[in-house]
């Protein structure tokens, strides 16, 4: 047995397609029983990473262990421990949900395949639609069935590649609940997403993949702290005051909303900057009706980090 606290260890992993370097030395570790979220924009290399870890694609160099098993050398052992569901559900449309599950269970040589199928239909809230052909299922239902099928082999590490991309908000919420229930069953979940909101909602640990490397890695809270972005948002009743405000703070303003009559200012200089703003407003007779302070969301941090990475490249 392997008593390591990490379910996944990746170090210095590189992968190029022909001339195109996609992963340029990726390193991270995932704690057992946690939800790890690999966050990156479209084309960042998330699917490439997942495919390598799931032994569907070979890395060029580096190392990856899944529950202590070497992805390069012990592919068969790795495959026994994992499941992978991709963005496009692999269910047979001619069959009903129940038939899909029973067939997959029989392929796994499960004797009690009927019971297993029943249980998964219940767990994945597909009982009502169990005997309908999956051709009639919604995208969310198909994706749930796909994940249910992938669990029949009893994996302890589950890869979900963009499980909510293309789903409507209701199906997305249902998927989030299922992912949380999966975690409660003790498995490790490796999730990829383009949505910061999803990482914020689910992840114990987030790693941001950008231009082939991990540019930030930690809990959502830790990542938010990386960039101490804070805003003060002023609301104006009088257009004239708002106009003066914009003129005076043109360099510091990060957002203007004409409809709500608000102006946001990014606070980088702590209390000194805040005091200065109020003093200047007082001096120039700029009157705001209210102001609020706002902490950065993961989205703000992501944009900051990505911008930072761009700037560094050209230095
Ligand atoms: N088989 C392939 N051959 C050549 N380029 C590929 C191949 N698969 C993916 N790519 C390219 O590698 C980059 C990363 O792709 P991918 O891992 O699918 O990103 P993501 O899943 O984050 O959207 C993209 O620029 C994509 O076009
Ligand atoms: Mg992808």
Image (spheres, grey):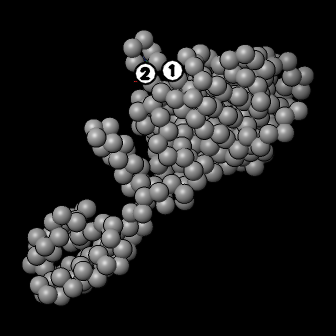
- Quadrant containing the C terminus in the rendered view: top left
For the residues labelled 1 and 2, the Cα–Cα distance comes to 6 Å
Task: Judge left or right: residue 246 versus residue 200.
Answer: left
Residue that mark 2 sits on: 21
Q: Residue 14: x percent and y percent?
A: 52, 23
Residue at position x 25%, y 62% in the image: 254
Residue that mark 1 sits on: 15
Is residue 186 at all visible to an observer of this figure? yes
Q: Is residue 34 above or below residue 110?
A: below
Q: Are marks 1 and 2 in contact (CB under 8 Å)?
A: yes
Q: Which mark is residue 91?
A: none
Residue at position x 67%, y 49% in the image: 180
Which of marks 2 and 1 precedes in the sequence? Answer: 1
Find numbered disc 1 in the image and state the secondary structure of the residue it sits on. Answer: strand
Q: Residues within 10 Å of mark 2 (few under 14, many from 20)?
A: few
Q: Residue 12: x percent and y percent?
A: 57, 29
């Amino acid at each position: 047995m392997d008593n390591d606290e990490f379910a996944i260890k990746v170090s210095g992993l590189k992968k190029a397609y022909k001339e195109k370097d996609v992963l340029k030395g990726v390193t991270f570790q995932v704690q057992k029983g946690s939800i790890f979220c690999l966050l990156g924009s479209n084309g960042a290399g998330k699917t490439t990473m997942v495919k390598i870890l799931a032994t569907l694609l070979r890395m060029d160099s580096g190392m990856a262990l899944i529950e202590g098993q070497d992805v390069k050398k012990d592919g068969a052992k790795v495959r026994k421990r994992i499941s992978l569901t991709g963005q496009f559900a692999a269910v047979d449309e001619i069959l009903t949900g129940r038939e899909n599950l029973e067939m997959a269970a029989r392929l796994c040589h499960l004797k009690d395949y009927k019971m297993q199928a029943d249980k998964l239909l219940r767990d994945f809230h597909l009982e009502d639609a169990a005997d309908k052909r999956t051709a009639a299922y919604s995208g969310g239902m198909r994706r749930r069935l796909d994940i249910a099928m992938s669990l029949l082999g009893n994996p302890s590490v589950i890869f979900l590649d963009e499980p909510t991309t293309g789903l409507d908000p209701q199906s997305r919420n249902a998927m989030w609940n299922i992912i949380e229930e999966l975690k409660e069953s003790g498995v490790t979940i490796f999730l990829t997403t383009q949505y910061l909101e999803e990482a914020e909602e689910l992840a114990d640990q987030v790693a941001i993949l950008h231009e082939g490397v991990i540019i930030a890695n930690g809990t959502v809270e830790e990542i938010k702290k990386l960039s101490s972005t804070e805003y003060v948002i002023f609301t104006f009743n009088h257009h004239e005051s708002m106009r003066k405000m914009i003129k005076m703070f043109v360099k510091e303003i990060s957002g203007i909303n004409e409809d709500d009559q608000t102006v946001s200012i990014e606070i980088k200089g702590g209390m000194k900057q805040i005091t200065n703003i109020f003093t200047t407003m007082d001096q120039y007779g700029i009157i705001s009706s209210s102001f609020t302070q706002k902490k950065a969301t993961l989205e703000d941090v992501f944009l900051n980090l990505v911008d930072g990475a761009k700037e560094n490249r050209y230095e």
